[in-house]
Image (tube, helix red, strand yellow):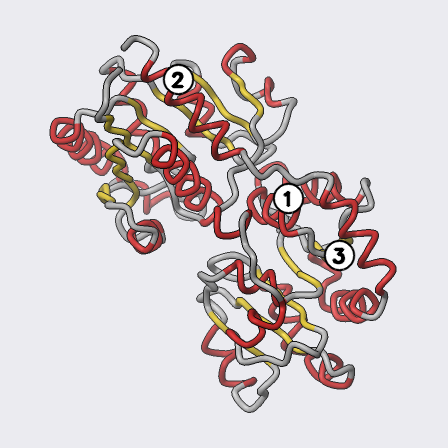
């Protein structure tokens, strides 16, 4: 059996791509410690910060996605694509990977396409219920496609699909943190009802605006708040709540295990990874789907839970008027919280990372 392996993990752009990739990398390392893992992402994107924080090296490509709002900005795309392929060729020459894993995002395309051209096994992980464009194009020559849900034959070759669920970070699946410790971490009071609101790395406009306008209603009910604003809203929110000791505000919360542990109720978008984590941590959730996601898949994700009595839905367009009342109704209804906890727990998959890692290692090592 070959001892030292080299694996490249490509993609990113959002936490929904990056964090599953890190979870898969961690599982590969656990199962086969003698594995060198290199990430490849897009220069200027959040993976260039988040991956090194997780302890892995990363190389950035000079590449950008197609800009639908301004066609003139796409003039340089062909040159950037050529540059990225040259950069990939150099990366492969130095690292000689045994396998390449793509998690979505436009930076995954040149890496996996080059690997396929070189005859190197390629694996795709699709976190969403709607196949991404890069993943769809690459799947035809991929060794295997790992999906979060069934019914993905619309996007990928049926004989290559393995339904695994979404890999959730180990510090979340194995968290032993209690509410008291978590609240102390955020400078909050463990005896108070606590709501954790998150809207992704850029922030959720509807959630942020609803909270900002109606904070006084939370104050009246003695509810405290952990508020991940996203970078577009941080300055505005921090200026307005700096005198409120019961509100913890951050652009991006890295210690998600702490945030989940502190929360009695979570308010979230309904991206695939957010829902996977909510199922694992078994938290009562109010979901506000992003309405402009491809094929409105966030609403489909949310309805999958709502129909199982595992979450509450507030439409984005209704958030300003309905979100705070929904929060207050749920935070005061212990019976409803218990029902939501029980039903969402039934949907949890805690070992998706290991399932994916085992399948990849089996393929790499089968010829040795």
Q: Position of residue 274 (x, y in %)?
A: 58, 49
- Return the residue nearer the eye: 58 or 264: 264
Q: Which residue is mark 3?
A: 314
Mark 3 or mark 2, which is nearer to you? Answer: 2
Residue at (70% x, 78% y) in the render: 192
Choose the circle earlier in sequence order: 3 or 2. Answer: 3
Q: Position of residue 294 (x, y in %)?
A: 57, 39
Residue at (58% x, 24% y) in the render: 163
Graded by Cα atoms within 10 Å as few (under 14), some (14 to 19) or many (20 or more), the crowding at tag 3 reads some
Q: Quadrant of the N terminus?
A: top left
Graded by Cα atoms within 10 Å as few (under 14), some (14 to 19) or many (20 or more), the crowding at tag 1 reads many
Choose the circle earlier in sequence order: 1 or 3. Answer: 1
Q: Which residue is mark 2?
A: 362
The CA distance from mark 1 to mark 3 is: 12 Å
In the rendered image, the vertical position of residue 296 relative to residue 156, given as above or below = below
Name the mark on residue 298.
Answer: 1
- Return the residue nearer the eye: 101 or 5: 5
Residue at (38% x, 14% y) in the render: 141
In the rendered image, the vertical position of residue 354 relative to residue 312, given as above or below = above
In the rendered image, the vertical position of residue 211 relative to residue 55, given as above or below = below
Q: Quadrant of the C terminus?
A: top left
The answer to whether residue 190 is left or right of residue 12 is right
């Amino acid at each position: 059996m070959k001892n030292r392996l080299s694996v490249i993990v490509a993609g990113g752009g959002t936490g929904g791509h990056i964090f599953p990739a890190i979870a898969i990398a961690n599982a590969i390392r656990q199962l086969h410690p003698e594995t060198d893992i290199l990430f490849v992402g897009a220069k200027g994107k959040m993976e260039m910060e988040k991956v090194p924080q997780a302890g892995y090296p990363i190389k950035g490509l000079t590449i950008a996605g197609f800009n639908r709002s301004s066609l003139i900005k796409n003039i340089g795309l062909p040159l950037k694509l050529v540059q990225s392929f040259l950069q990939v060729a150099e990366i492969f020459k130095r690292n000689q990977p045994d396998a390449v894993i793509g998690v979505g995002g436009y930076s995954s395309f040149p890496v996996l396409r080059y690997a396929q051209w070189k005859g190197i096994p390629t694996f795709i992980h699709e976190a969403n219920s709607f196949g991404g464009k890069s993943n769809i194009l690459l799947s035809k020559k991929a060794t295997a496609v790992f999906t979060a849900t069934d019914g993905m034959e619309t996007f990928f070759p049926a004989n290559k699909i393995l339904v695994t669920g979404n890999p959730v970070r180990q510090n979340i699946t194995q968290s032993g943190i209690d509410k008291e410790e978590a609240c102390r971490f955020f400078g909050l009071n463990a005896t108070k009802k606590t709501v954790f609101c998150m809207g992704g790395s850029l922030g959720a406009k509807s959630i942020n605006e609803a909270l900002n306008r109606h904070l006084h209603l939370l104050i009246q009910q003695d509810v405290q708040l952990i508020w991940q604003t996203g970078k577009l809203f941080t300055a505005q929110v921090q200026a307005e709540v700096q005198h409120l000791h019961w509100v913890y505000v951050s652009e991006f919360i890295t210690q998600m295990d702490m945030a989940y542990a502190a929360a009695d109720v979570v308010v979230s978008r309904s991206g695939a990874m957010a829902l996977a984590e909510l199922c694992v941590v078994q938290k009562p959730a109010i979901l506000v789907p992003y309405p402009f996601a491809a094929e409105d898949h966030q609403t489909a994700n949310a309805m999958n839970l709502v129909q199982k009595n595992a979450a509450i839905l507030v439409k984005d367009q209704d958030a300003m008027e309905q979100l705070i009342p929904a929060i207050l109704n749920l935070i005061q209804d212990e019976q409803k919280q218990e029902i939501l906890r029980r039903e969402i727990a039934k949907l949890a998959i805690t070992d998706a990372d290991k399932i994916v890692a085992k399948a990849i290692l089996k393929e790499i090592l089968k010829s040795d």
